[in-house]
Image: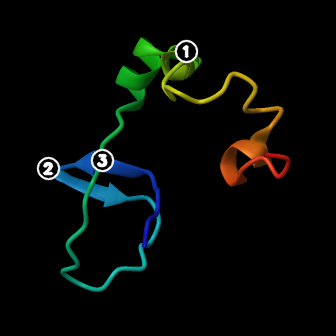
Amino acid sequence: MTTAFKAVYEDGVLKPKVPLQLEEHSEVEVLVLSPAARDADDPTGWKTIDSLIGAAKGVPSNVSERHDDVLYGDPHE
C-alpha cells in the first residue's frame, strides 16, 4: 500500500492528521517533505520541471506526436 498524508511533528513523534489503515507495529518507510524548504527552493515547481527536460536520452523529438508508434512500434515499418 502506498499512501500520502499530512502529519504533525510533536514531542519527537510524527502524528498523522488522519487515521491510517495499518496494523499495529507495522514497519513503514517515511519520506519527509518539509513545506518550508520545498517552497523556498522551488515555490512554483518550475525548477523541478525544467530539470526533467532532456532527461529521457534517446527518445525521439516527436514522441508526443507519435506516442503509440514509439511505445509499440510503427505499424508501417
Three-letter code, disc 3: Leu
What is the residue that sits farthest to the bottom in this orientation? Answer: 23
Q: Which mark is residue 60?
A: none
The kind of secondary structure element at disc 1 is: helix
Instruction: Residue 2 in the image: state x and y as whole percent.
Output: 44, 66
User: Would you say the residues marked 1 and 2 are in contact, meaning their CB atoms lie under 8 Å apart?
Assistant: no
SS at circle 2: loop
The residue that appears at 55% across and 18% down in the rendered structure is 53
- Give the residue at mark 1: 50
Coordinates of residue 32 in the picture (x, y in percent)? 30, 43
Q: Which sits earlier in the primary sequence, circle 2 or circle 3?
A: 2
Compare marks 3 and 1 and give the one earlier in the sequence: 3
- Quick check: 29 above or below 61? below
Tell me what residue is drawn at x 78 percent, y 48 percent: 68
Residue 27 position within the rendered picture, expressed as x and y whole percent measured from the top left: 20, 72
**In front of the other: label 2 or label 3?**
3
Vertical placement of 17 versus 49: above or below? below
Crowd class of label 1 (few under 14; some 14 to 19; many from 20; radius 10 Å): few
Q: How many marks?
A: 3
**Residue underneath mark 3:** 31
| Mark 2: amino acid | Gly
